[in-house]
Image: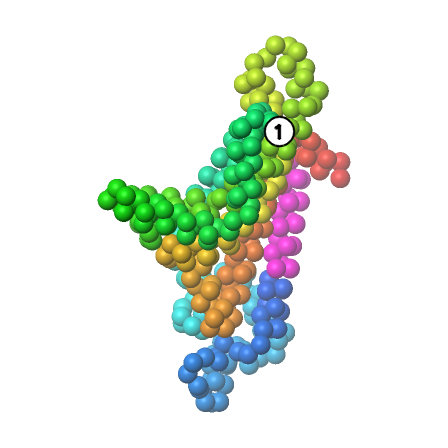
Amino acid sequence: MAGYVLKRIGYSLLTILVLVALTFFMMQLLPGDPFIGAKAIDESTKAMLMAKYGLDKPVWQQFIMYVGNVFQGGLGVSTQYKRPVVDIIAESFPYSFELGIRALIFAAVMGVLLGIVAAVKRGTAWDTGSMLIAMVGVSVPSFIVGALLQYFFSVKLFQWTGMRLFPVTGWTTEMSKLLPAFALSFGTLASISRLMRSSTLDVLSSDYVKTAKAKGLSQAKIIWRHVVRNAIMPIVTVLGPQAAAILTGAFVVEKIFGIPGMGRFFVNSINSRDYTLIAGTTLFYGAFLVLANLVVDLLYGVIDPRIRLSGRKE
């Protein structure tokens, strides 16, 4: 098990190194410079700013400085906000993280349950209804779901009942966090439910499930003891990418619901050509994706011992 863990950690560190290099050189390819804005500045002021942020040095020197700063925990200073990028991320990421965790937990739990129900009740109204929800979730973007939730559960519900159960915007109370979390989770919930249904159907037709039925085990015991553990393997595999997709997809949902997360800073940094903040947030989310995949790989080894055994043979 130790060898398997060390190998996965090594792959993750190598991926982060490649990500750092790609992020830097892609920023170099962007047109213009971060000091092109609404206010015109003279050449001497521009040269002073370029020297302050190290942009007047050769590209290879900038790259060495950038890599050194990254591995020292520094991502530079935002040219727009005049603040360290690390401070901006530390301030805004907890909001995005809480929103993403709420959405991921809801999507995973409800997606797995819907998939199991659809597979066990194959060909019935339960199956049709579950897959209809999944089809809608895959087809409709999260910002459309968010806007519809705001209209019906915040505006219309208040008009019908006179009670403001769900605020239109904000992130202060538990009720204000339900609608954005559900809007963000809907697409992932749909994908997980479809994958879980397909995986459960495969497991239900396996020999060991037929043997369990022949022994007289109840359907509930067969499902929870034999089916779920084996059918959930593909779900564990996609949780890492889905977690990253939820967090990056939260940018628009945060904007719609007025949540002070990283989405606001990321969008503003693109509009203002704030290369430092763009690179910092891109690198942060990329490293988060690598970390999420690492956790999934380790969980995969815990759930399926065959993974660890194959790693030893290598």
- Give me the residue at 26% from left, 42% from top: 161
Q: Position of residue 176 (x, y in %)?
A: 33, 47
Q: Secondary structure at mark 1?
A: helix
Q: In this picture, is 39 found above or below 5?
A: below
- Give me the residue at 65% from left, 50% from top: 11
Q: Position of residue 154 (x, y in %)?
A: 32, 48
Q: Is residue 6 magenta?
A: yes
Q: In this picture, is 216 found above or below 91?
A: above
Query: In the figure, residue 300 lies in which quadrant?
Result: top right
Q: How is the image coloured?
A: rainbow
Query: In the figure, residue 302 lies in which quadrant?
Result: top right
Residue type pointed to by label 1: Thr
Q: Quadrant of the C terminus?
A: top right
Query: Which residue in the protein does label 1 denote?
Result: 200
In this view, the residue in front, 204 or 285, is 204
In this view, the residue in front, 161 or 73, is 161
Q: Residue furthest right?
A: 313
| Residue interval drawn in magenta | 1-19
Query: In the figure, residue 19 lies in which quadrant?
Result: bottom right
